[in-house]
């Protein structure tokens, strides 16, 4: 297990380093150059030179890259000249809100998807199974933002059940208004419910064809025991990996959900800075999101190795 | 119950043995085509895609609307005789706009999927075939790009570059090639050790011949299945980008962008601005997904979608 963790962790670090290459490259994609992008089109040549010197942009690229890594390691994610605040401070305000949104919706997705998938596997190829398969295909194909719009139209505008916009303020203030969280969490969760239940259903059906199921039936185990004690447990483990894999998709969904409901999270911050072309904020958020994704999939792989020891011995 | 293996997935593993021997001689493509045709969902999906293409590209020939100049006095009209689906906030006829939006969605979706598949196949085949340290480096690069959620990457690129149709196609394609690259690489890893590929080497064939003539054709099933899902994903990505205001600027039309202006008028009860484009997106994406699902069953390839 230790060997596997070290190997897998090492891969994670390599990936994070590669991510910094990408964001560093992205920074140099900024229109004109960073100085132009930050100071604006009216900046004079002298101002640009001064800015370049002050921020090390007059050095060769590889020195700039190492300086950039040094800043990242010190927790310096850049500075938003438009909001006049450090990116780290901005993220400190917004990150908890996104963690609440994403965390709640993954938990909700699990709670709903597991019984649905079990029901489908038990009643496979019956009307219930077809109806649920159809429903999950539908939600799987539904854009997050449209789902949010429908929820606002039906449950906030037509019937005043929930507020149409998310609660504002810090994480504590958001949690103090649970009613406002219902629509954003439901919007983000529904797509995950569809993909989790699709996956778990087919994973259970795969397992039903395995030899151990035949053995269990042959020794006279009742169908309930076969399903819940044998098939369900074996089908559940791969779901851990799926969460790790779906994390980037869920975070993209969170960006959309946050912008539909004006939810004060990291995705909304990213989108607002895209609208005002606040590049340092965009790059800072990208790094944090990417590291979170790598950490998430690393955690999922390690948990999976705990759940299924065979994985540890298989070389990736 | 004798065999609980009536489930779709279970059938996939036993399907070949269960076939009558006469059919065993048929080519794998023919078998796949036969399975595909028997699947009602797949046929429904395919029919829908063709109908949507006809609606978007042939519709404007019969249903003439002005989609270029705005008509502010006639804006936000509810559906009626003159405008079956009403008008939007700039006075464009919603039904005509739906057709225009369909053109963009299908064009960008198909072309981006083509770009993504092309790059992914080449990259994956080379990486899997090379193996060793080259494979390691190439795959870590894929991991790194996969770690940045697609939408964040797309939004960044579109704040830097001004969008037009071609750029949308290239950029969505450039962001989406990672999954086919992984799938093809995984298949190549196992294919390159097969005897018929080794035979090419023994006969003095070049590595290029091994990849282009023997390995890639054998991943065709995987590639086709994934390409179908790529179209669905590209249509969703285009809609999301346009919804966020980063798609093609007006008067070009797009379903996502139509929904984005619908959001502004949702509180005024302009339901006709949010339901038709949304339903169009869902049904089109669903059609591609269901065709992809059935293709996967037909090719009996055990692909996992992201």
Image (cartoon, coloured by chain):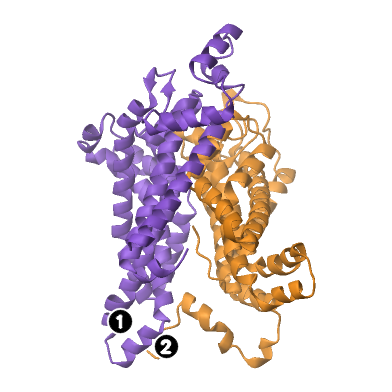
Chain colours: A purple, B orange
The x and y percentages for residue B186 are 57, 64
Residue drawn 54% across the image and 16% down it:
A52
Whether residue B300 sits left or right of residue B104 in the image: it is left
Quote the CA–CA distance across marks 2 and 1.
Answer: 13 Å
Whether residue B94 sits left or right of residue A258 in the image: it is right
The x and y percentages for residue B220 are 67, 66
Q: Chain of mark 2?
A: B
User: Which quadrant of the rendered structure holds the N terminus of chain B?
Assistant: bottom left
**Of A288 and A12, the residue lying toward us:** A12
Whether residue A93 sits left or right of residue A146 in the image: it is left
Q: Chain of mark 1?
A: A
In the image, is residue A4 above or below residue B67? Answer: below
What residue sits right under mark 2 in the picture? B3
What residue sits right under mark 1 in the picture? A226
Dot 2 alpha-carbon crowd within 10 angstroms: few under 14, some 14 to 19, many 20 or more: few
The x and y percentages for residue B296 are 57, 68
């Amino acid at each position: 297990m230790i060997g596997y963790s070290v190997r897998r962790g090492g891969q994670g670090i390599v990936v994070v380093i590669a991510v910094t290459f990408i964001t560093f490259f992205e920074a140099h994609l900024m229109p004109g150059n960073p100085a132009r992008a930050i100071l604006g089109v009216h900046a004079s040549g002298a101002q640009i030179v001064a800015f370049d010197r002050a921020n090390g942009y007059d050095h060769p690229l590889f020195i700039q890259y190492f300086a950039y890594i040094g800043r990242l390691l010190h927790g310096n994610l850049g500075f938003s000249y438009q909001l006049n605040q450090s990116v780290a401070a901005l993220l400190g305000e917004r990150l908890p809100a996104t963690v609440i949104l994403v965390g709640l919706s993954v938990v909700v997705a699990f709670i709903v998807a597991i019984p649905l998938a079990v029901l489908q596997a038990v009643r496979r190829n019956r009307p219930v199974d077809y109806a649920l398969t159809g429903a999950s295909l539908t939600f799987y194909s539904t854009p997050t933002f449209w789902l949010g719009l429908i929820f606002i139209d039906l449950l906030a505008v037509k019937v005043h059940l929930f507020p149409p916009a998310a609660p504002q303020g810090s994480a504590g203030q958001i949690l103090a208004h649970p009613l406002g969280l219902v629509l954003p969490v439901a919007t983000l969760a529904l797509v995950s419910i569809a993909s989790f239940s699709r996956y778990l259903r087919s994973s259970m059906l795969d397992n039903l064809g395995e030899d151990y199921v035949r053995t269990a039936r042959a020794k006279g185990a009742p169908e309930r025991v076969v399903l819940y004690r044998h098939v369900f447990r074996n089908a559940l483990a791969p779901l851990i990996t799926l969460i790790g894999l779906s994390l980037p998709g869920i975070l993209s969904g969170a960006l959309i959900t946050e912008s539909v409901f004006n939810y004060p999270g990291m995705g909304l911050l990213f989108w607002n800075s895209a609208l005002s072309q606040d590049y340092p904020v965009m790059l800072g958020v990208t790094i944090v999101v990417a590291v979170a994704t790598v950490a998430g999939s690393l955690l999922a792989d390690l948990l999976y190795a705990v759940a299924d020891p065979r994985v540890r011995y298989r070389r990736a | 119950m004798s065999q609980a293996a009536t489930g779709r997935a279970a059938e996939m593993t036993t399907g070949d043995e269960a076939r009558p021997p006469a059919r065993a001689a048929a080519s794998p493509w023919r078998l796949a085509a036969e399975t595909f045709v028997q699947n009602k969902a797949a046929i429904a999906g395919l029919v829908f895609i063709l109908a949507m293409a006809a609606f978007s590209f042939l519709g404007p020939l019969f249903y003439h609307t002005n989609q270029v100049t705005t008509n502010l006095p006639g804006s936000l009209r509810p559906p009626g005789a003159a405008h079956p689906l009403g008008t939007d906030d700039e006075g464009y006829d919603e039904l005509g706009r739906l057709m225009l939006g369909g053109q963009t969605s299908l064009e960008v979706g198909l072309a981006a999927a083509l770009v993504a598949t092309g790059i992914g196949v080449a990259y994956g085949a080379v990486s899997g075939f090379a193996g060793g340290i080259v494979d390691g480096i190439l795959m870590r690069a894929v991991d790194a790009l996969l770690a940045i959620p697609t939408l964040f990457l797309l939004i960044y690129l579109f704040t830097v570059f001004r969008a037009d149709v071609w750029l949308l196609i290239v950029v969505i394609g450039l962001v989406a090639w990672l999954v086919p690259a992984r799938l093809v690489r995984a298949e190549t890893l196992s294919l390159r050790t097969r005897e018929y590929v080794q035979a090419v080497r023994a006969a003095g064939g070049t590595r290029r011949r091994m990849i282009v003539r023997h390995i890639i054709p054998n991943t065709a099933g995987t590639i086709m299945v994934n390409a179908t899902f790529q179209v669905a994903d590209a249509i969703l990505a285009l809609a999301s980008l346009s919804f966020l205001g980063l798609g093609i600027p007006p008067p070009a039309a797009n379903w996502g962008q139509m929904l984005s202006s619908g959001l502004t008028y949702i509180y005024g009860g302009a339901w006709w601005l949010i339901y038709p484009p949304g339903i169009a997106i869902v049904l089109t994406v669903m059609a591609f997904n269901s065709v992809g699902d059935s293709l996967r069953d037909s090719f009996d390839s055990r692909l996992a979608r992201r």
